[in-house]
Amino acid sequence: MDFKTEPIIDVREAGIFQGLDAVLTNVNFDIQKKEFVFLIGRTGSGKSSLLKTLYADLPLRMGHVEVVGFDLGKIKNKDIPFLRRKLGIVFQDFQLFSDRSVAENLFFVMKATGWRDKGKMKSRMAEVLMLVGLADAATKMPHQLSGGEQQRVVIARALINSPDILLADEPTGNLDPDVADGVFKLFQEINKQGTAILMATHNHDLLRKYPYRVLKCEKGQLLDSKTADISINTSF
Ligand SMILES: Nc1ncnc2c1ncn2[C@@H]1O[C@H](COP(=O)(O)OP(=O)(O)OP(=O)(O)O)[C@@H](O)[C@H]1O
C-alpha cells in the first residue's frame, strides 16, 4: 500500500509578481496536511503577494504551484471559486458586512459557495460559531462585537467549508496583545483538529513563544526554517 500523501501546497521554482515586477524569485516549499507555518518578513517583502498568489488573486507567471489539488499555472477563472472553497482565507481587516448580522454574514458565504439546504446551513453555522467561542453571537451586528470577536467571526466564516488549510494575513495585527493571544490560541485549536495553517505575521512574541516552522521573505527570496537558519530575533 502507498502511504505517501500529497502536500496541500506545493511550490516549485515559482516567481511571485506584482504586475511585471518580480517580488520573490525561485520560491520552493511545500506544506503538508496539519502543518502550522509562520510566514514572516519585513513590510513590503512579499508575504501578502505570496498568499494572494496561493489563492489565485495574483496570477502565477513563473514556475509550478499546486494548491489543494489545483494547478495554478493552468487554473481557469471559472475554477477559482472551487479552489477558494477548499481554502479558508483570513485577512487583517475583518471585512464583515457591517449592515448584516453575524448569521447573515455567514449565510452569505454559504449561499455563494453552493449551500442550499436551510437546515444544514443553520446547523453548520451553529457548529462554526461554537468552535470559535461565539455560540451566542448569531443575531448580533458586527458593531456590537469587539475587535477580537469580529476576527473570530471571520475565522468561523473561513471554516464553513471545512478547508484543508487556512491562509491568514496578519490576523492578529489590529488586536490588543491579550486579544491577539486568544485569537492565536484559536488558530492552534483549529490546527489541532487537523487544518493546516499558513499565517503571515509581524508578531515577534508569537514566534518566540511557539516554535513552528517559519518561511521568511527576504531580499526577493523565500527562506525555509526546514532548510535554512532563520533568525527570528532580528527586525522583520
Ligand atoms: N497592488 C499592488 N500593486 C503593485 N505593487 C504592489 C501591490 N501590492 C504590493 N505591491 C508591492 O509588492 C511588494 C510586496 O508587497 P507585499 O504587500 O506582498 O508585502 P508584505 O510583506 O505583505 O508587506 P506588509 O508586511 O506591509 O503587509 C512591495 O514592493 C509592494 O510595494
Image: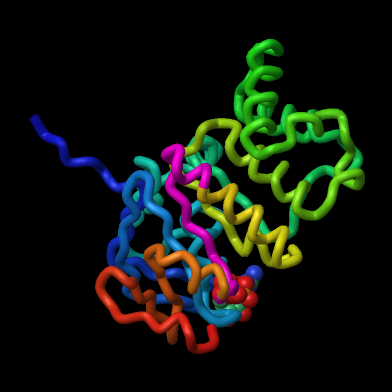
Residue 195: x %, y % from top left: 45, 42
Residue at position x 86%, y 44% in the image = 142
- The foreground one among 181 and 116 is 181
- Tell me, yes or no, if residue 74 can be seen here: no
Q: Position of residue 176 (x, y in %)?
A: 75, 66
Stretch in magenta: 189-204
Residue 63: % across, % down:
32, 63
- Residue 101, relative to residue 94: is it above or below? above
Q: Quadrant of residue 180?
A: bottom right
Q: Is residue 52 magenta?
A: no
Which residue is located at x 38 percent, y 75 percent? 222
At 75% across and 53% down in the image, what residue appears? 148
Q: Which residue is rendered at x = 31% and y = 63% of the image?
A: 29
Count of marks, rendered view: 0
Which residue in the rendered view is the most extreme toward the left? 1
| Quarter of the image with the N terminus in it | top left
* Quadrant of the rendered image containing residue 141: top right
Q: Position of residue 157 (x, y in %)?
A: 66, 38
The image quadrant in which ligand 1 is located: bottom right
Say if 17 sits above or below 88 in the image.
below
